[in-house]
Image: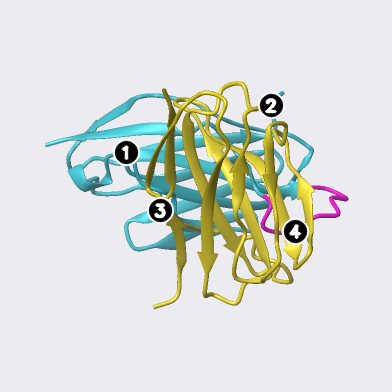
Chain colours: A yellow, B cyan
């Protein structure tokens, strides 16, 4: 079955540590996205990538980094510079050349800083 | 005005009633809209998309778009307890936006509770 796989589902981190969240898709989608969701805040865009080896900052990129070395993979690193990293992180993909704008989401990764 | 706005709720309706969820948007949002349903602790799933003025029906769901009023709504007929979730309204990327069509702008969501 095609879809988006995020791991880990739950992650605990000590302050000052970097952590990397994995996102893999087998939908052959060109574009991939990382969103952050806080309670009552909706989804906020962290980074997105339309093509391999290229990515763009979203609205809240500070303290995060990404890479897009393969079409299928778009890992997100939450660095120690991120002041309030505890949140629910969602990876998504879309057919960039489609005009539908439909996003397909992974199941999410919940990060808690201890 | 925020780009996509929703009443956070909670909206409570009895089982079998019509639930009406509303969303307004600013000029910066292009005129393609999406409704996502998100159960607590889960990821959003697309339930309706609408691109043209008017109504679009799919089973118990009807999406309505009124471009003149910059208003989009989702009606759920014969509401069931399983419809209890947060509903996210999302608009297409800003006009003249150079990024991907999938870069949606989300509202904060409306929490719906359907009481048996």
Residue position marked by numbered label 2 in the rendering: B2
Q: What element does badge 2 sit on?
A: loop
Q: Say whether residue A86 is visible.
A: yes
Residue identifier under label 1? B40
Relative to residue B26, is residue B64 depicted above or below? below
Give the secondary structure at mark 3. Answer: loop
Chain designation of label 3 = A
Whether B14 is among the magenta residues is no
Instruction: Locate residue B60, reporting x and y percent.
Output: 32, 57
Q: In which chain is the residue bearing label 4?
A: B
Given contact means CB atoms under 8 Å apart, are the residues at marks 1 and 3 in contact?
Answer: no
Most prominent secondary structure in the magenta stretch? loop
Picture disc at residue A107: 3
Question: From the viewer's perspective, is A27 left or right of B38?
Answer: right
Q: State which mark lies toward you, 1 or 3.
A: 3
Front residue (pair B15, A113)? A113
Q: Which residue is mark 4?
A: B100
Give the CA separation, mark 4 to mark 1: 28 Å
Same chain under badges 3 and 4? The reply is: no
**Circle 4/circle 1 CB separation < 8 Å:** no
The C terminus of chain B lies in quadrant: top left
The Cα–Cα distance between marks 1 and 2, rounded to whole angstroms, is 25 Å
| Marks 3 and 2 belong to one chain | no
- Residue depicted at 34% across the width and 47% down the height: B76
């Amino acid at each position: 079955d095609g879809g988006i796989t995020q791991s880990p589902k739950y992650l605990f981190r000590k302050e000052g540590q970097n952590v990397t969240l994995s996102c893999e898709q087998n939908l052959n989608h060109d574009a991939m996205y990382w969103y952050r969701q806080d309670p009552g805040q909706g989804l906020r865009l962290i980074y997105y990538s339309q093509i391999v080896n290229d990515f763009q900052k979203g609205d809240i990129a500070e303290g995060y980094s990404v890479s897009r070395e393969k079409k299928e993979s778009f890992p997100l690193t939450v660095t120690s510079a991120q002041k309030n990293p505890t949140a629910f992180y969602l990876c998504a993909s879309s057919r960039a050349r489609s005009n539908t704008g439909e996003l397909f989401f992974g199941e999410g990764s919940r990060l808690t800083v201890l | 005005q925020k780009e996509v706005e929703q009443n956070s709720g909670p909206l409570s309706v009895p089982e079998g009633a019509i639930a009406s969820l509303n969303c307004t948007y600013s000029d910066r949002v292009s005129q393609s809209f999406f409704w996502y349903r998100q159960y607590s602790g889960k990821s959003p799933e697309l339930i309706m998309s609408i691109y043209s003025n008017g109504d679009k029906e799919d089973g118990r769901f009807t999406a309505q778009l009124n471009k003149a009023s910059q208003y989009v709504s989702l009606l759920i007929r014969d509401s069931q307890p399983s419809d209890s979730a947060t509903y996210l309204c999302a608009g297409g990327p800003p006009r003249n936006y150079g990024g991907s069509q999938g870069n949606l702008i989300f509202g904060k969501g409306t929490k719906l509770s359907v009481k048996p």
